[in-house]
Image (cartoon, rainbow, N blue to C red):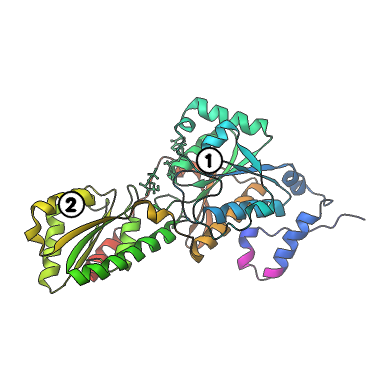
Amino acid sequence: MPPREVAVTPLCRIGSSPDFPCAIVRAILVAENQGTTGAARLRMTARRVAVLTSGGDAPGMNAAVRAVVRAGIAHGMEMFGVQHGYTGLITGDFRRLGARDVGGIVQRGGTVLGTTRCVELKTDAGQHKAMQQLGDGGISALVVIGGDGSQSGAHALSQRGLAVVGVASTIDNDLHGTDVSIGATTAADVALEAIDRLRVTAASHQRAFLVEVMGRGCGYLALMAGIAGGAEAIVIPEVDVDPEDVARELRAAHDRGKSHAIVVVAEGARYNAEALAQYFKANERQLGYDLRVSRLGHIQRGGNPGVFDRMLATRLGAAAVDHLLADRHGVLLGVVGGQVVGTPLAEVANRTRRVDVQWYALAKVLAA
Ligand code: ADP
Ligand code: F6P
């Protein structure tokens, strides 16, 4: 029987395609139709593709792994998971992944592949070993799911000739090339729930709470959770404030008749929660409130991904496969203005994005 010619619809565009169900059927036919001719088919069957997660784990990483693996399989690729991020890349810790191996993980936080902070990958020798392991495994392409550090590593490997596609994933939301990264929304929701609970006890005791949230050098999580949680004050790295300024804001809130107050502090601010608390301990009368401190820490990373992060991860994971099929690599995939966009890794590596401080001005108005 002559091979059927089947048009391929990129999986990342399926949701917006006018013939949505037909597009899925066509993608499945492509996978089943091993006899199909054409340069694209030859390229895709030749590909052995690995996927890894790296840096701080983020809710939705598993959904992205699942999307990469299943979209790759649908296009006739052989898929491999790298265990423990770049550490596993350097030691050759690869595992063949089938569709069943990524079952039951879409709803789980963390990463089933494991993740590390791997200093060795920053070195010439480490990158060389990683390239050798990939070569030995006959793997010609890599999908890197992670934050800015991980994408710097992806860029380094891409410069060594590997076909690499990055997928934006960090709770910090500090990556260039995406409006929002996988995990940031769920982490903000976890912080928000904690803030809501702290407000309950703050109100009962007429106290002020300093709530410290993660985010490294970026104030995104603090600002989003702070605004959504109705914080009386927000302290972020992007806006330089002194403890005296925060004390003044709390005093003013007290004098406006507020019985309690919440201050959301980003861990990367010049004065984090501990530094602010030290100052306030010595000057408690200035505040008008009794003060307590709560550091949320890693709790923010451990949530189950919500629908937004699962969908973002699914879109970006499928788009990573589309990009490899089209030989478009050396890019980070993110979402800009609602669309999946690839930004050259060279523009993303070794840079971090700061939060838009217009939100900060709005937060101040709303804290009235
Ligand atoms: P994230 O990706 O969440 O920002 P890290 O900053 O810890 O997390 O980076 C994750 C890993 O990426 C590092 O442990 C290291 O292996 C790799 N990496 C970070 N920066 C670089 C770099 N400049 N060059 C090569 N690899 C890097
Ligand atoms: O990058 C994600 C993040 O959770 C940051 O917000 C935080 O500063 C850092 O990782 C914590 O790293 P670790 O898990 O290594 O303590």
Mark 2, secondary structure of its residue? helix
Foreground pick, 6 / 368: 368
Foreground pick, 167 / 231: 231
Q: Which amino acid lies under the numbered mark 1 shown in the image of this protein?
A: His
Q: Which residues are magenta?
A: 14-21
For marks 1 and 2, the one nearer the N-term is: 1
Q: Mark 2 — residue?
A: 276
Q: CA distance from mark 1 to mark 2?
A: 37 Å
Residue 75 drawn at (x, y percent): 72, 52
Residue 145 drawn at (x, y percent): 52, 47
The label number, if any, that marks residue 84 in the structure image: 1
With 287 as the anchor, is 358 left or right in this view? right
The label number, if any, that marks residue 119 in the structure image: none
Ligand 1 lies in which image quarter? top left
Residue 236 in the image: above or below residue 79: below
With 16 as the anchor, is 177 left or right in this view? left
Residue 293 drawn at (x, y percent): 23, 56
Mark 1, secondary structure of its residue? loop
Is residue 22 magenta-colored?
Answer: no
With 105 as the anchor, is 364 left or right in this view? left
